[in-house]
Image: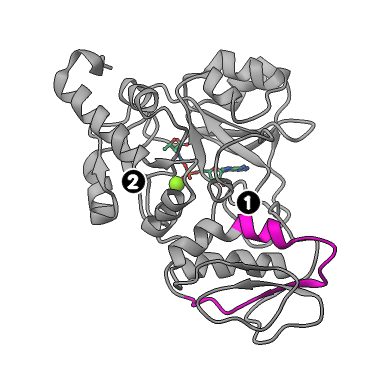
Amino acid sequence: MADPSEDPFAEAAIQKAARSIREGQLVAFPTETVYGLGADATNADAVAAIYAAKERPSFNPLIIHVASVEAAEQLVVFDDRAIALAEANWPGALTLVLPRRDDCPVSLLAGAGLDTLAIRVPAHAFASRFLQAAAVPIAAPSANKSGTVSPTIAEHVRESLGAAVDMILDDGACSIGLESTIIDLTTDIPTLLRAGGVTMELLERQIGEIQPAANNDETPKAPGMLSRHYATRIPLRMAATHLEDGEALLAFGGRTLGSAPAVCNLSRGGDLKEAAANLFDMMRQLDRPEYTGIAVMEIPETGLGRAINDRLKRASQ
Ligand code: TXA
Ligand code: MG
């Protein structure tokens, strides 16, 4: 692992990539596990572009990458087990799921509306220099289209995502080539959500028993989506064409359905990326007991609209 700060070409590329991130663009970057498709995690529009590029029909919460434990502590709440795991494994191929801090600046979309975040400090000279230079937390799933294998060289990223990615930081092959291990620390006994770069045996020696994820759904879901998602407390009705008494309105596009006690518009211009960026925030804003429910106007089932509708459907059941 060469030190990129001693290579003027690498350093220039990293600085350019960091600027692109701060401008809201998508940058694919190498880590020790796989290449990530990164965006400024605090910028919901940039995060929406990740979901659009991956063409995933649902919102999966993304892993948030930071340069140091101190930077992670600004975002999530650490308990003793988290401190022990972070000290022993970071930087490294371990992702921890922890509660968001109240003042956490990461967009709700990056965490798919959950009140927890998956976070890790990668052990890769390029990645860590890039994270330092960007100086914002970077949300990054693996840099491939949904349903395809994770990329371990820059060429894979180019093949899979093409023009959907603004820039690729190339540092050859990833040394581990397998995604990070994900441990959920919000359960009494820590839960293994995904096996990966760091073995469970090693982690159990560090913090004791770790339980496998209970898969109590008949349909296999991505790790982390195990029936835990933000459900609205009041009923939510999709493809609404009129308003019931006392319903708040979640609008889309230029039309309205009449006068509601509260209205949020996902995107007046009918832009699905903007709608995705606003979705979780607006769901929370309208989810108040003084309304009888939330009426959601029809959202087209194309592009990001599929992920938005998937999310609304889960909330409406
Ligand atoms: O090695 C890796 O982890 C790579 C590199 C780029 O860091 N990233 C990666 O990200 O594999 P992705 O998005 O492909 O996988 C993230 C996984 C998802 O399966 C998701 O369900 C889980 O992390 N996850 C994210 N946030 C979560 C949360 N708050 N609670 C539970 N699971 C979460
Ligand atoms: Mg992936």
Residue 68 x %, y %: 49, 19
- SS of the residue at dot 2? loop
| Coloring scheme used | one colour
Give residue 61's position: percent from left, percent from top: 56, 48
What's the residue type where badge 2 is placed?
Answer: Leu
Q: Is residue 292 magenta?
A: yes
Q: Is residue 200 above or below residue 248?
A: above
Closest to the observer: 37 or 288? 288
Q: Looking at the image, tell me whether mark 1 or mark 2 is earlier in sequence order.
A: 2
Highlighted range, magenta: 280-301
**Residue 26, which numbered label?**
2
Q: Is residue 288 above or below residue 12?
A: below
Residue 88 image point, x, y percent:
57, 14
Identify the residue shown where x is 40% and y is 32%.
33
Give residue 113's mark. Answer: 1
Q: Quadrant of residue 289?
A: bottom right
Q: Does 18 sit above or below residue 205?
A: below
Q: Position of residue 87 (x, y in %)?
A: 58, 13
